Image (spheres, grey):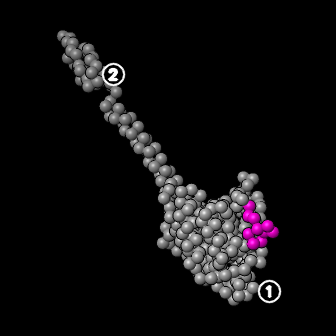
Amino acid sequence: MSVRWRSLEWKSGRAIRQKDLCKGHETILIQNNSRTMTPTSTRFDTRWRGVALGLAVALIGLIIWDGADRRAADSTLPLAQSPNSSIKNESPDHLKLASFNIHGGKGSDGLRSLTRTAELLTDIDFAGLYEVKAISGGASSNQATVLAQPREAGWLFAPTERRWWSDHFGNGLLYRIPVRSSLRVPLVNTRGKAYRNAILSTVELKRATVRIVAVHIDRENDRRQQLKSVIELFLGLQKPCLLMGDLNTIASDPLLEDLLANPDVHSPLQESLEDGHLPSQNIDWIFTRGLSTISAKLIENTASDHPLLQAELVPEDVEEK
């Protein structure tokens, strides 16, 4: 039997010298092939598994980035609020109100507790709330609903931002008196984040209808333009009316100095202080037109990083002598 040798070239570039017997030639080649070569299909499978894993990681990262991104809430949608039928109280003669940046329920001690926040709002007829967060996966859709429950109060949530494909953050109202209407007013935003709005509400007192603007102003680039807009809105309202909120600016701000120079505008807190001097770093405000001040005070607390600003007001034509 003759024996022949030949060199076999494979795609891998490796050469194999192999004895080619007259019989069993094909079988020997197949056996040697399986022992010395990694099949092309296996190399392709490994490569595509790596590509698929990379694409999956990139897709997950894209989804997380998209969900975490802060976007403006849709201001054309109806506001989430409790029905007016839930309000059992009649319209009062006086208006006892509060303006409070609740800091998402996180206190100055770093602990998060809406129970402490609710305790500060026990006797309030109408409250403007800022830095109110949405709640996912629970019976309550936002923190305003949680605060309203123990008081059997009405609530409203006016989102300013969306995250994770749902309303996430904004302003809110609590009220124990009839509210005729509420309107969300979007404010200018040039930063692409830190979106803001104002809530314009009409509430019923026994002898007057009061218009209330509750707002949280930006503290950076858009502060001046937003503040200017809400001041113009406030000065254009029919009396009696008031502007309240976290304005993120102090008394020396020229816009506030001009506002307080208007003889038709009053600061209940300033009028209630013995010396009339406001705290130098105060940024929480209430301004009124056509309303007289019965009392006003700042209440320091551990429920938030802001004091609660409280005031009791009465329309000028029914002021008690």
| Span of residues in magenta | 270-279
- Which residue is the site of mark 1? 321
Is residue 179 something that shows in the picture?
Answer: no
Residue at (41% x, 37% y) in the render: 50
Q: Quadrant of the N terminus?
A: top left
* Mark with earlier residue (2, 1): 2
Within-10-Å neighbours for mark 1: few <14, some 14–19, many 20+: few
Is residue 279 shown above or below 34?
Answer: below
Image x and y of residue 151, in percent? 73, 74
Of helix, strand and loop, which one carries label 1? loop
Is residue 2 something that shows in the picture?
Answer: yes
- Which residue is the site of mark 2? 36
Q: What residue type is labelled 2?
A: Thr
Q: In terms of secondary structure, what is the magenta stretch mainly?
A: loop
Residue at (57% x, 56% y) in the render: 220
Of helix, strand and loop, which one carries label 2? helix
Residue at (49% x, 57% y) in the render: 192
Residue situated furthest top in the rendering: 2
Residue 129 location, quadrant: bottom right
Q: Residue 4: which disc?
A: none
Residue 267 location, quadrant: bottom right
How far apart are the alpha carbons under marks 2 and 1?
Answer: 107 Å
Q: Is residue 62 left or right of residue 205?
A: left
Q: In this view, does 2 lie to the left or right of 203?
A: left
Is residue 193 shown above or below 312?
Answer: above
Image x and y of residue 59, in percent? 44, 48
Q: Which amino acid does label 1 sit on?
A: Lys
